[in-house]
Image (spheres, helix red, strand yellow):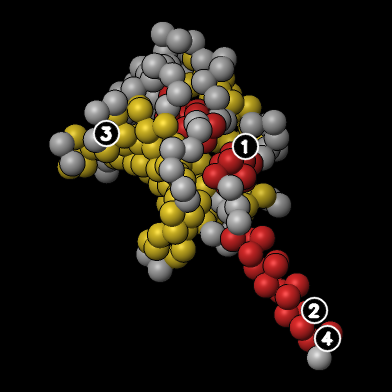
Amino acid sequence: MRQRLAIGLLSLLLATALRAQTPEQLLTHARHSIGSMNGTFEGWMIVGNGQTKVPFLVTAKRDGTFTYKFFDPAESLPIRVGTPAGIDPEKFSRVIRNTGVTPEDLSLWQLSWPSARPIEDKMSNGLKFHVVTVANPSDKGVYGAAEIWIHQKSLALFRIDAFDRSGKLARKMEVQKIRNFGEQRIAEQMRLSTFSGGKKTASTYVQLVNQRN
């Protein structure tokens, strides 16, 4: 009886520990789920139904550093997941080659903002998520707050809803497809949607196509 009680108590404690993730722990897991990517990948930024397609090459390192390279004319854009550091301040919120995507979006720096309220549990498409609401601690960038959606089982980043300074939804960034590149299982496609007045006005897909050796 005592052994059963001990086993039952241990199971309860473990379950409680799994649920007792802090917002900071969840955001750290989310940063790692993106920042642990490693290698060089060919990709496209595809606007809407493909009316604009911008090729790029991105080199990712396990420290969360990404370097995007664009062509005609050649341009290099270094970022580090979860921080605006290293991005030219004049280019931080500037749209990249008419795609609607900015270096601010690619940096996902909302993952390092402080939490603004307790964790919420929500459902989407039959999946369970922890939702962490964060607030921009500075006057940098166009977003003032964000909701970070983290898959409860894998603790991987699924979605970011970014709000403008007046609290209105401005951008939704969603992982659309996950794929194995060698031994890595990473986001193959992310959709970045722009909103105005509560309505979606445009979408751009950041699509990885192939990994270079």
Q: Secondary structure at mark 2?
A: helix
On the image, numbered disc 2 is attached to which residue?
6
Q: Are marks 1 and 4 in contact (CB under 8 Å)?
A: no
Q: Amino acid at mark 3?
A: Gly
The residue that label 3 is drawn on is 167
Q: What residue lies at 27% left-to-right and 43% top-to-bottom?
A: 49
Specify few, some or many for label 3: CA neighbours under 10 Å numbering under 14, 14-19, or 20 or more: few
Residue corresponding to mark 1 = 35
Residue 2's tag is 4
Question: Does the CB distance between marks 2 and 1 fall below 8 Å?
Answer: no
Q: Does residue 154 appear to the left or right of 167 in the view shown?
A: right
Q: Position of residue 129 (x, y in %)?
A: 47, 58
C-alpha span from label 4 to label 3: 54 Å
Sooner in the amino-acid sequence: mark 3 or mark 2? 2
Instruction: Work out whether residue 168 or residue 90 is closer to the camera in this orientation and state it.
Output: 168
Could you tell me how far apart the alpha carbons at marks 3 and 1 are, in whole angstroms?
Answer: 28 Å
Q: Along the polypeptide, which appears first: circle 1 or circle 4?
A: 4
In front of the other: 66 or 21: 21
- Element under disc 4: helix
Please state if 1 lies on the left or on the right of 84 as rendered: right
Q: Is residue 19 visible?
A: yes
Closest to the camera, between mark 2 and mark 1, is 2
Pair 1/4: label in front: 4
x and y percent of residue 206 in the render? 43, 38
SS at badge 1: helix
Residue drawn at point x = 39 percent, y = 20 percent: 141
Mark 2: which amino acid?
Ala
